[in-house]
Image: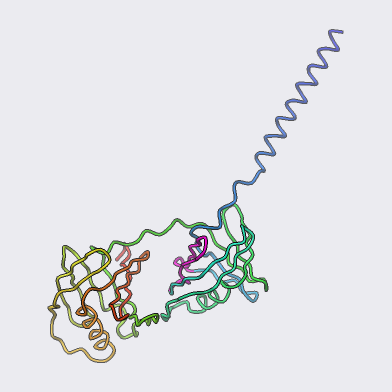
Amino acid sequence: MRRYRYVHATAALAALALALTGCGRADEGRAGPLPDVVGSWSVESLTSGGRTMHGPESARVDIGHDKATGSYGCNGFTAQVVLDGTSSMTVTPGATTLMSCADQDFETQFAKVFKGRLTIDRGPDRLTLKTADGSTIAMTPKPPAVDAPLTATRWTVDATVNGDTVTSLPPEAAGKAVFTITDGTAAGSLGCNRFSAKATVEGSTLTFGPLTSTRMACEGQVGAVERALTDLFGSGPLTWRIQERTLTLTAPDGNGLTAKAASAAE
């Protein structure tokens, strides 16, 4: 009898150890929590027509409960979004900027794919959106970008604004108009002539005082941009808005500009 009880107890312990081992293996194979669709995403790649294109670092989508904003890589966009739980979403494109960009092919394809009904495939570390024809957008989580500060930032003008139309500066003038606002003063270049002026920030408005500038003759597209900026800065209070590293200044008549913040390397 003693021998039987000993064998029985040993068998029970072995069975318990096997069960615990099995549980451990099951836990090891269990997937982590799937990400929420609502959030900030970096566009890793998109596939359309059998071709895969890798997204630039700046390509991103911020998905909210009823809208999305982001960047095709260069041009910004907005869209209305209707979420069907976590299985699909319907995207209706809204406004977009119209700048000429280096990777225009990717931008065009991104805009083409990110619309209509998209099914959602959630993985532990990625989100894949798929169209009815099989095109896909692969995205990975990205922390929300921190907006650059208005002051003590070197801003480079990259486009002019007329209502809903944003037009990139012509190549001849690109990268030449820059300014920085520090201690109540704005200073920089209008593209040809250097300038300085008093700058007053009150809430969401920015007002330039009379501009003092050098007096070089500026011709062609560079001169045209300089005259447009001079008129804008002298038009009274401008509404300012910053999204990530892009500053938008808008006059009451709808005219304005967009400017990019310098990177740390600059």
Residue lying at 67% horizontally and 43% vertically, measured from the top left: 29
106 in relation to 15, above or below: below
Q: Is residue 44 magenta?
A: no
Residue lying at 64% horizontally and 46% vertically, measured from the top left: 31
Horizontal and vertical percent position of residue 66: 52, 64
Q: How many marks?
A: 0
Horizontal and vertical percent position of residue 60: 48, 65
Point out the image quarter for the N terminus.
Answer: top right
Q: Is residue 58 magenta?
A: yes
- Which quadrant of the view contains residue 90? bottom right
In the figure, is residue 93 to the left or right of 147?
Answer: right
82 in relation to 124, above or below: below
Colour convention of the picture: rainbow
Residue lying at 29% horizontally and 81% vertically, measured from the top left: 253
- Which quadrant of the view contains residue 233? bottom left
85 in relation to 109, above or below: above
Direction top: furthest residue: 2
Direction front: furthest residue: 252
158 in relation to 246, above or below: below
43 and 38: which is toward the camera: 38
262 and 86: which is toward the camera: 86
Per the rendered image, the range of residues in magenta is 56-74
Point out the image quarter for the C terminus.
Answer: bottom left
Horizontal and vertical percent position of residue 239: 28, 71
In the figure, is residue 246 to the left or right of 192?
Answer: right
Horizontal and vertical percent position of residue 5: 83, 12
